[in-house]
Every structure is written in C-alpha cells, then in structure tokens.
Amino acid sequence: MKKVFFFISLFVTLASQMSYAVFNNSGVMRSKSSNLAADILSNTGTIEGLDYVHLQCNQLTGNGLIKGPNMEILAVECDYEGVIDCSQECILKTNTPSSKFKFRFIGGGKLVLKKANN
C-alpha cells in the first residue's frame, strides 16, 4: 500500500509541475482567430487575429504587437510593454492597476478594463 501511495503522489507531483507552460512568440502569428493560453505568455513578435484574438495567461510580457479588431485578453498580471492595436473592442481582464500599464493602445477601438478572477 505504501508503494502505491508513493507512486500516486509522485505522479500527481510530476503532472502538476508539467502543467506549467511558457509560450514565447518572437515571430509572426496570423490567423482568422488567434487563441493562445499559457501560464506565461511572452510576445516580442506579432500576434494577429483577422477577426478575433483571445489570450489567456497568468502573466503577459514582451514588447511586440497584438492586433485584431476584437480581442479578449485575460492576464492576471500584465507586464506587457508592446502595442495593442484594436479597431473595435478590446476586453482586458487583469489585476494589474491601469496606472502600472506599460503598453500603448492604438487603433481607435474601445479598451474595456475588468478585474481578473483568479
């Protein structure tokens, strides 16, 4: 019984550690709808959704370009220093106060800020 418990504990520990994911984009990602999810999402390139962009992460970093007419970004911590180019509506859910934002918002769209539910 002790051996079974040990292997189950080891498996759960390894499985929980493997779920930690970092996504680093330093190129150009362009699609009709861009959907990305990671614990840490680092964008030093371009993420573009021709119709829609959906990003979900615990931490958003980088200094690239996120572009799309409509987007929803869930970033519990927003350390992004790049450009968000949105022509219609961008919903940003974060726990980072807007006074700490380092990104530029362009494109003439509406930026809607909401508190993230972590």
Image (spheres, rainbow, N blue to C red):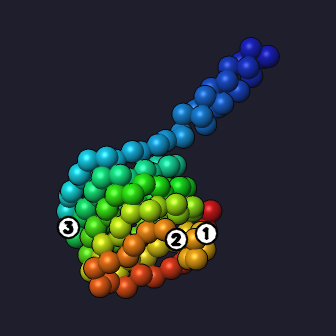
Give the class, few, some or many, for how many residues have Cα within 10 Å of label 2's Cα (few <14, many ≥20): few
Left of 13 or right of it: where is 46?
A: left
> Residue 40 in the image: x percent, y percent?
50, 49
Tell me which numbered mark, 2 or 1, is placed earlier along the sequence. Answer: 1
The residue depicted at 32 percent of the width and 78 percent of the height is 106
| Displayed quadrant of residue 52 | bottom left
**Element class at badge 2:** loop
| Displayed quadrant of residue 103 | bottom left
Tell me which numbered mark, 3 or 2, is placed earlier along the sequence. Answer: 3
The relative height of residue 115 versus residue 30 in the rendered view (above or below) is below
- Tell us which disc is closer to us: 2 or 1: 2
The CA span between labels 1 and 3 is 27 Å
Q: Which residue is mark 3?
A: 50
Query: What's the mark number on residue 101?
Result: 2
Q: Amino acid at mark 3?
A: Leu
Locate the C terminus by quadrant: bottom right
**Element class at badge 3:** strand
Q: Amino acid at mark 2?
A: Phe
Q: Amino acid at mark 1?
A: Asn
Q: Which residue is mark 1?
A: 95
Q: Nearer the viewer, residue 97 or 33?
A: 97
Q: List the single residue furthest toward the right.
A: 2
The residue depicted at 20 percent of the width and 58 percent of the height is 31
Give the class, few, some or many, for how many residues have Cα within 10 Å of label 3's Cα (few <14, many ≥20): some
